[in-house]
Amino acid sequence: MTDTNLVHVPYKSVVYALTDVMSGQVQLAFSVVPAALPMIKQGRLRLGVTSLTRTPLAPDLETIAETVPGYEMTGWYGLLAAWSCPAVICS
């Protein structure tokens, strides 16, 4: 929507990604609000909310859609666990 070129850099944790943003190793990262909020409140990071509406966690943070009309990116969380099927059920 803005003709911005991005290079995906995989991180094992959002903490490492935010550390690299703060140190200037990378220019931006996508993060969940709770992980970045302490650094935002300290003025060490700037955040643009990727949903269409502002987040109740930080209502003063602007959405990207306020600058780039129609922009929206939402994510989801999943819980993954190893499954061990009891012999009674699986046999």
Image (cartoon, grey):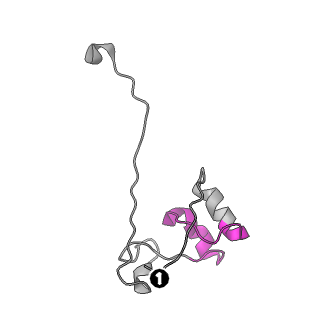
In terms of depth relative to the viewer, which is nearer, 10 or 45? 10
Residue found 62% across the figure and 74% down from its top:
45
In terms of depth relative to the viewer, which is nearer, 61 or 68? 68
Q: Is residue 22 left or right of residue 5?
A: right
* Quarter placement of the C terminus: top left
Tell me where residue 56 appears, x and y as whole percent: 40, 73
Query: Relative to residue 19, is residue 89 depicted above or below?
Result: above
Tell me where residue 9 appears, x and y as whole percent: 60, 58
* Quarter placement of the N terminus: bottom left
Q: Does the magenta-highlighted stretch encompass residue 27?
A: yes
**Residue 38 in view here:** yes
Query: Relative to residue 58, is residue 84 depicted above or below?
Result: above
In terms of depth relative to the viewer, which is nearer, 25 or 60? 25
Q: Residues in magenta?
A: 21-46
Residue found 66% across the figure and 67% down from its top:
26
In terms of depth relative to the viewer, which is nearer, 77 or 9? 9
Residue at image mark 1: 60
**Residue 63 in view here:** no
